[in-house]
């Protein structure tokens, strides 16, 4: 048994529906959300500027009070303070991400031990407004830090002192929320399998037109082994995950996603004809045009069906993640698919189906189950993972559909081959997560050239001539440099 060396907290966000409230409470909550939306927007515009770089979120309310008071909107001071603090925390996280990106660029621009002092000084300047004194740092921060704006006007944040929770029955609780009137609380009923506590977020979803309560749940701690089993996974469309051990998880995902996509496409085509008829009849027969708009072109039924489809897809992905971890603490290597695939020519039908591919839900589901089992998910650079032969780590071979055929004619299951490449890339010190696609291609072409020379006695041009290597690589800059001996 591996030795237990640490503990990990299992924390997840629980979403519970609001199942009861009076119309007066509903109206007041929606009004409060709109007012807090103004506060959020103004706070983001003010605190999101570089002048407030590194501001402690605990001091943010004091700054916002200089130009916006709660009395001007008829808001309680505490509700406004909690909203401002929530915005400030988001801005702090964005600044931390920017700092991290700038530090990486500094390390890349000034490598080696000779520049160690300079790197350290520049990294210290980035954390404060001192970076304004350096034209280089100022330019890098301006490029990385995209100042945002907030249009959020559908939520209210409550701290523990802003509400009371009372149990009504086994799975229902009553929350008394702080309202606009002093000493008067808004009562709502929620359906939950545990008591609501800590900071909560009341959200009104436009799609379902329902209220939800979001709060964090601490499930305790998990002991993490020093050496967990390492697994690489390929995120797919046909099935959710295919691991490096040859197991598919979440079968039927692609079939369901395609069915959903085709249904929406067919329905929208019919709606398009009705829209054209509605426009045509607006001047000729306004009464019929209005009937078509009211009875055939609303979104209520379609939104309900869309939520059902999304729920089914999410359910399959969740079951796939559960099956992958199976209650075991693993070290999982997965593709980083946060960046869009550029310069990829594909048909409208393929694009439409890929839009149904819930890669964001996959990522969140993996992280959720990793937290619950004490596992670690590490994302790797995804470029060419499906075009590399996992047996030798070269570009010799070709993928066609579900099969990958090596230069020697051996056929591998394509997703299994990709998962093995992802596992290998997790410990590849030459290919890092934030490398560009061209840089990854250059590394793989160098490895392919060495393999060809040592094993087969060929060069890259010979490999293309005998169809061992895809001719598309010959157009790259790295290929031309290798041929010229640079």
Image (cartoon, rainbow, N blue to C red):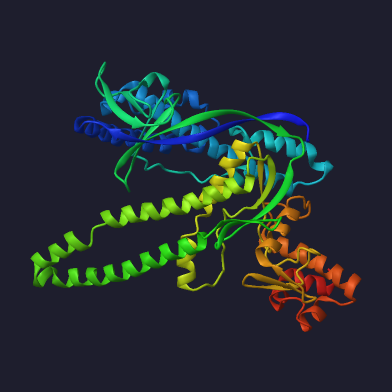
Residue beneath the point at 71% across and 55% down: 245
Q: Residue furthest bottom?
A: 465
Q: Quadrant of residue 73?
A: top left
The residue sitting at the front extreme is 170
State the image coordinates of residue 265 (x, y, percent, origin top left). Answer: 37, 68
Number of numbered tags placed on the structure image: 0
Vertical order, 160 against 320 (above or below) = above
Seen in the picture, residue 156 relative to 293 is either above or below; the reply is above
* Residue 198 to residue 423: above or below: above
Q: Residue at x 70, y 33 (%)?
A: 224
Residue at 79% from the left image edge and 42% from the top image edge: 115
Residue 66 visible at all = no
Give the quarter of the image for residue 86. Answer: top left
* 264 or 321: nearer the viewer: 321
Residue at left 62%, top 72%? 401
Image quadrant holding the C terminus, namely: bottom right
Q: Nearer the viewer, residue 428 or 47?
A: 428
Q: Is residue 473 left or right of residue 61?
A: right
Image quarter where the N terminus lies is top right
- State left or right for residue 6 relative to residue 129: right
On the image, the x and y values in percent for residue 181 come to: 24, 21
- Taking depth in this image into account, of 17 and 156 the one nearest to the observer is 17
Percent of width and height locating residue 327: 63, 40
Position of residue 108 measured from the top left corner of the image (x, y, whole percent): 73, 49
The answer to whether one can see residue 448 in this image is yes
Does residue 246 appear to the left or right of 55 in the view shown? right
């Amino acid at each position: 048994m591996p030795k237990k060396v640490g503990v990990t907290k299992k924390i997840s966000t629980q979403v519970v529906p609001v199942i009861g409230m009076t119309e007066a409470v509903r109206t007041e909550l929606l009004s409060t959300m709109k007012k807090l939306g103004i506060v959020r927007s103004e706070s983001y515009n003010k605190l999101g500027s570089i002048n407030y770089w590194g501001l402690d979120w605990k001091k943010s309310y004091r700054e916002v009070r200089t130009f916006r008071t709660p009395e001007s909107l008829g808001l309680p001071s505490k509700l406004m303070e909690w909203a401002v603090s929530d915005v400030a925390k988001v801005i702090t996280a964005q600044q931390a991400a920017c700092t991290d990106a700038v530090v990486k660029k500094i390390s890349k621009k000034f490598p080696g031990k000779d520049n160690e002092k300079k790197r350290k000084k520049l990294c210290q300047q980035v954390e404060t407004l001192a970076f304004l004194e350096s034209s280089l740092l100022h330019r890098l921060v301006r490029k990385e830090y995209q100042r945002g704006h907030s249009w959020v006007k559908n939520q209210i944040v409550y701290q523990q002192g802003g509400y009371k929770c009372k149990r009504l029955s086994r799975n229902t609780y009553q929350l008394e929320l702080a309202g606009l009137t002093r000493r008067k609380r808004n009562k709502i009923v929620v359906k939950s399998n545990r008591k609501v506590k800590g900071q909560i977020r009341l959200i009104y979803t436009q799609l379902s037109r329902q209220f939800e309560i979001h709060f964090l749940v601490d499930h305790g701690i998990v002991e993490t082994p020093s050496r967990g089993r390492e697994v690489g996974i390929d995120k797919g469309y046909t099935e959710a995950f295919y691991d490096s051990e040859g197991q598919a998880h979440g079968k039927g995902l692609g079939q369901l996603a395609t069915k959903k996509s085709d249904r929406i496409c067919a329905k929208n085509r019919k709606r398009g004809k009705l829209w054209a008829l509605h426009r045509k009849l607006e001047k000729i027969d306004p009464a019929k045009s209005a009937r078509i708009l009211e009875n055939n072109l609303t979104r209520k039924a379609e939104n309900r069906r869309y939520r059902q489809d999304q729920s089914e897809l999410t359910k399959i992905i969740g079951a796939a993640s559960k099956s992958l971890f199976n209650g075991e603490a693993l070290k999982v290597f997965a593709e980083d698919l946060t960046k869009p695939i550029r310069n990829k020519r594909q048909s409208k039908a393929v694009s439409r189906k890929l839009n149904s591919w819930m890669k964001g839900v996959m990522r969140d589901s993996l992280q959720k189950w990793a937290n619950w089992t004490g596992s670690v998910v590490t994302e790797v650079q995804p470029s060419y993972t499906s075009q590399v032969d996992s047996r030798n780590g070269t570009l010799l071979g070709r993928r066609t559909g579900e099969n990958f055929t090596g230069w020697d004619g051996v056929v591998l299951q394509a997703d299994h081959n990709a998962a093995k490449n992802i596992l290998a890339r997790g410990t590849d010190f030459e290919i890092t997560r934030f490398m560009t696609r061209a840089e990854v291609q250059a590394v793989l072409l160098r490895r392919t050239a060495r393999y060809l020379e040592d094993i087969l006695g060929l060069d890259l041009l010979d490999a293309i001539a005998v169809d061992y290597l895809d001719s598309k690589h010959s157009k790259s800059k790295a290929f031309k440099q290798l041929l010229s001996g640079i």
